[in-house]
Image (tube, grey):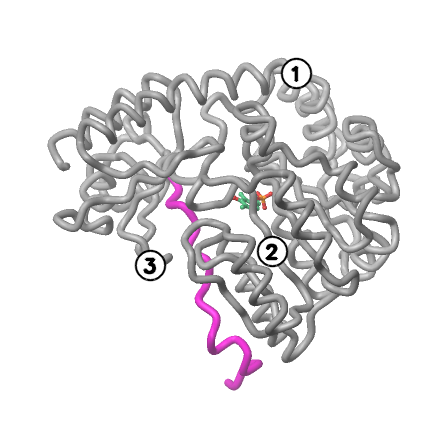
Amino acid sequence: MKFNPTLESIQSYEAGKPIELVVREYGIEKESIVKLASNENPFGCSPKVKAAVVSMIDAMALYPDDSMTKLKNSLANKYAIAPNEVVIGAGSDQVIEFAIHAKAHHGAKVLMNSVTFAMYEIYAKHVGAQIIRTASREHNLEEFYALYCEHKPAIIFLCTPNNPTGDAIDADAMVAFIEKIDVDTLVIVDGAYMEYARFKDPSKAIDPKTLIKRFSNVLFLGTFSKAYGLGGMRVGYGIAQAPIIHALYKIRPPFNITTLSLEAASVALEDEDFVQGCIADNFEQMKRYEAFAQAKQITLIESYTNFVTLALPERHNSGVLAQALLEQGMIVRNLSSYGLNAIRVTVGTSIQNDRFFQLIDPLV
Ligand SMILES: *Cc1c(COP(=O)(O)O)cnc(C)c1O
């Protein structure tokens, strides 16, 4: 069968390996597998969320509240914006999809960092858009501006902090950059790890309200999958001025968020102390990775997230290393498909990190 020719250049997204797969393929007991591959919160979500979801269980038979009023109001309240400046997606992934479908078309250009979140390219290719990438591994706004002038892209993606490298863009520099961009170019600021960056360094903290008050062409993305510990519930959001949200709504399928997910996300926002505690622990534990990298002469890119990217010296191959760890029940992310001889490791609990160091130590 012939498919849409634009699919030919798309490689399916390679998700972090689930624990069940490692049980099946390597016969390792579930309890001794550690997954540090998808940047989930190792402490999960607030216990209040669990209680709320359980108490909602009887609502499963009915369609969800498609207005999503409760969650939109909670987000509007958190960011001091209006509910009509928010769109909810099944993960911020889905908001990326809405935005690309709403703005790009065949032959349009989409500008992004050389190494960045893989879904931007995949969704852009769905509509036959052309991908333009910078050359530097970390975001370089001068390069972005030069390519913007040359190509006049329909969409620019800025991922800060960036996945899979962990670096973050300076907030003032970002504002100065967006000021130079025409209002007809959509600038998507992906803040999937912004809670971590805000905690570590206020100069990297992007406030969605400030951004959208100033710019009519910016869409800020956030997610409940990382710091809020709800990756399995699939809830993310976009924040922009109402006309952008209105356009994204034309793409959104009805009932795209389940009742239980909407409830989980709303309640998660009521327990910020839990999230802040997890973030504090994350950066405490990250120091151990920094010390390890230094001792082993491995380059650790300074991280504003809940993961570290370890760039390996030439004598090591990231694919071989990730596989050796996998066979011992330790799931990390090999970044060779991004053109990097590096592995990305989610910072786990202290016990999970102990295990990581124990397993990797003889290998590097
Ligand atoms: C994890 C992630 C997302 C989206 O995750 P969802 O689970 O779909 O909300 C978006 N952007 C980046 C950079 C991410 O790392």
Q: Secondary structure at mark 3?
A: loop
With 280 as the anchor, is 286 left or right in this view? left
Q: What residue is pinned by disc 1?
A: 48
Q: Secondary structure at mark 2?
A: strand
Q: Main secondary structure of the magenta part?
A: loop
Q: Nearer the viewer, residue 334 or 164?
A: 164
Q: Secondary structure at mark 1?
A: helix
Q: CA distance from mark 3 to mark 1?
A: 41 Å
Give the amino acid at mark 2: Phe
Per the rendered image, the range of residues in magenta is 1-19
What's the mark number on residue 157? 2
Q: Is mark 2 within 8 Å of ligand 1?
A: no
Number of the front mark, 3 or 1:
3
Residue 10 falls inside the magenta stretch: yes
Quadrant in which the C terminus appears: top left
Ligand 1, what quadrant? top right
What's the mark number on residue 339? 3
